[in-house]
Image: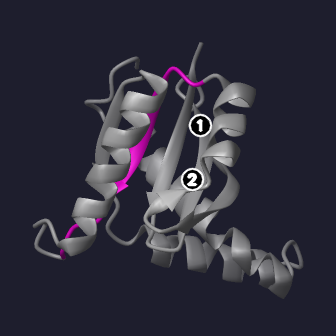
């Protein structure tokens, strides 16, 4: 099994992506709503059941200097919850600039006619794919 799920944790939405350790590729799957600090667990449970990941990767929001910030606590809290809920290894990885890269990818896809304005809701899932691709490409990632 080489499947990994990645997450871009926000206060209102959590972007979810699936990646493959062998190919190093990832793609966005969904943006899951967050209510009262908790994600829509039924949707996350369904994605876990569908993809059967061997590990989970959660983006850790850091400052430009690489320090933790208030949003880092939310990402760590989410990582703890999914680790307990799914009994899978969870890795935290630097997510700096992932949202900007996702927005650039979306803009490029729109310019090429591959995406429409209404697809903007998928930017959170694309950010999760960026986070996951970076993690998959890192030399210290186990399984390479």
Callout 2 crowding tier (Cα within 10 Å): few <14, some 14–19, many ≥20: many
**Residue 84 x %, y %:** 37, 29
Disc 2/disc 1 C-alpha distance (Å): 8 Å
Name the one closer to the observer, 73 or 121: 73
- Quarter of the image for residue 72 reads bottom left
**Residue 124 x %, y %:** 59, 68
Q: Counting residues from the N terminus, which is met first, the one under dot 2 or under dot 1?
A: 1
| Quadrant including the N terminus | top right
SS assignment at label 2: helix
The reply to whether residue 94 is visible in this rendering is: no
What numbered label is drawn on residue 136?
A: none
Residue 27 versus residue 19 in the image, above or below: below
Residue at 35%, 44% in the rendered image? 79
Q: Does the segment drawn in magenta span residue 38?
A: no
**Residue 50 x %, y %:** 75, 29
Residue at 80%, 81% in the rendered image? 110
Residue at 59%, 37% in the rendered image? 19
User: Magenta part of the protein: which range?
Assistant: 53-63
**Left or right of residue 1, residue 70 in this image:** left
Residue 113 versus residue 81 in the image, above or below: below
Name the one closer to the observer, 34 or 7: 34
**Left or right of residue 61, residue 12 in this image:** right
Q: Which residue is mark 2?
A: 129
Q: How is the image coloured?
A: one colour
Residue at 63%, 60% in the rendered image? 32
Callout 1 crowding tier (Cα within 10 Å): few <14, some 14–19, many ≥20: many
The reply to whether residue 124 is visible in this rendering is: yes
Q: Are marks 2 and 1 in contact (CB under 8 Å)?
A: yes
Q: Which residue is mark 1?
A: 19
């Amino acid at each position: 099994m080489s499947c990994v799920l990645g997450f871009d944790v926000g206060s209102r939405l959590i972007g979810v992506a699936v990646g493959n350790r062998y190919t190093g590729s990832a793609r966005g799957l969904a943006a899951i709503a967050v209510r009262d600090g908790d994600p829509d667990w039924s949707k996350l449970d369904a994605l876990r059941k569908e993809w059967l990941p061997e590990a989970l990767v959660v983006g850790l929001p850091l400052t430009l200097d690489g320090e933790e910030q208030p949003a880092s606590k939310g990402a760590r809290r989410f990582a703890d919850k999914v680790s307990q809920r799914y009994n899978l290894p969870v890795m935290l990885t630097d997510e700096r600039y992932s949202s900007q890269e996702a927005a650039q990818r979306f803009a490029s896809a729109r310019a090429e006619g591959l995406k429409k304005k209404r697809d903007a809701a998928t930017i959170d899932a694309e950010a999760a794919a960026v986070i996951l691709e970076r993690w998959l490409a890192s030399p210290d990632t186990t399984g390479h």
